[in-house]
Amino acid sequence: MCQPLPRDFSLIISCALHTRCTCLSVDVSFDDGANFDWHWIAPLLGKSRRFGTNMKVKWHVLGHKSECKYFQRESANFKWISDSGSQTKSARWSDHTVSSSYTDDVGGTFVWPGDRGNWTTRIFKAPSITLECQSSDGTKISVPVTVPSPPDPGKFPQQ
């Protein structure tokens, strides 16, 4: 068990030295602020665009960040359907290991001119994301992220 060190050291520093890495907190932000907002993202490489958002994540830890483990627990099952019904884009989210600081490009990529037209969304399982940090002593911090169900993207923006 962690014991306080003499004088000016705190219990948390003693624990961090003992466990090598302790998860403290996480910062999460999106393209347009603190809330997840589905939107068309300006052109990527070439003439493609993404419908979604960029989620930026940074974990704060005490000790060596490489000694902690980081996860993005997520689930979703939905697809976008073109107005003609001839094209679909499926999204099936699943858990994955991440680093202590990263950007997740959430959403789907659409390519011009093949994906031009109107798109609607069909949801089979609403999206959810939980960020998780596991300290080297096995304790975990889990932080749910509010993710609204994707709306209909509407019309692919003109180039």
Image (tube, rainbow, N blue to C red):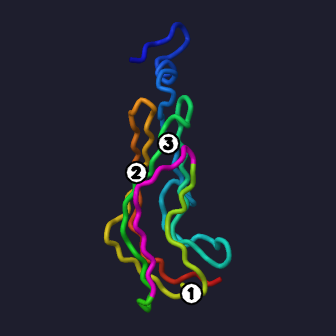
**Residue 60 percent coordinates (x, y):** 53, 37
Q: Earlier in the sequence, mark 2 or mark 1?
A: 1
Residue 88 is inside the magenta segment: yes
Q: Amino acid at mark 1?
A: Gly
Rendered position, 120 above or below 32: below
Q: Earlier in the sequence, mark 3 or mark 1?
A: 3
Question: On the rendered structure, is 14 left or right of 78?
Answer: right
Q: CA distance from mark 3 to mark 1?
A: 39 Å
* Foreground residue among 28 and 63: 63
Residue 25 is inside the magenta segment: no
Q: CA distance from mark 2 to mark 1?
A: 34 Å
Q: Residue at x 54, y 46 (%)?
A: 99
Residue 114 circle label: 1
Seen as rendered, the residue at the extreme right is: 46
Question: On the rendered structure, is 152 left or right of 31?
Answer: left
Q: CA distance from mark 2 to mark 3?
A: 11 Å
> Main SS of the magenta segment?
strand
Seen as rendered, the residue at the extreme left is: 124
The part of the chain drawn in magenta is: 87-101
Residue that numbered label 3 is attached to: 26
Residue 130 circle label: 2
Q: Residue at x 41, y 55 (%)?
A: 95
Seen as rendered, the residue at the extreme bottom is: 84
Q: Amino acid at mark 3?
A: Val
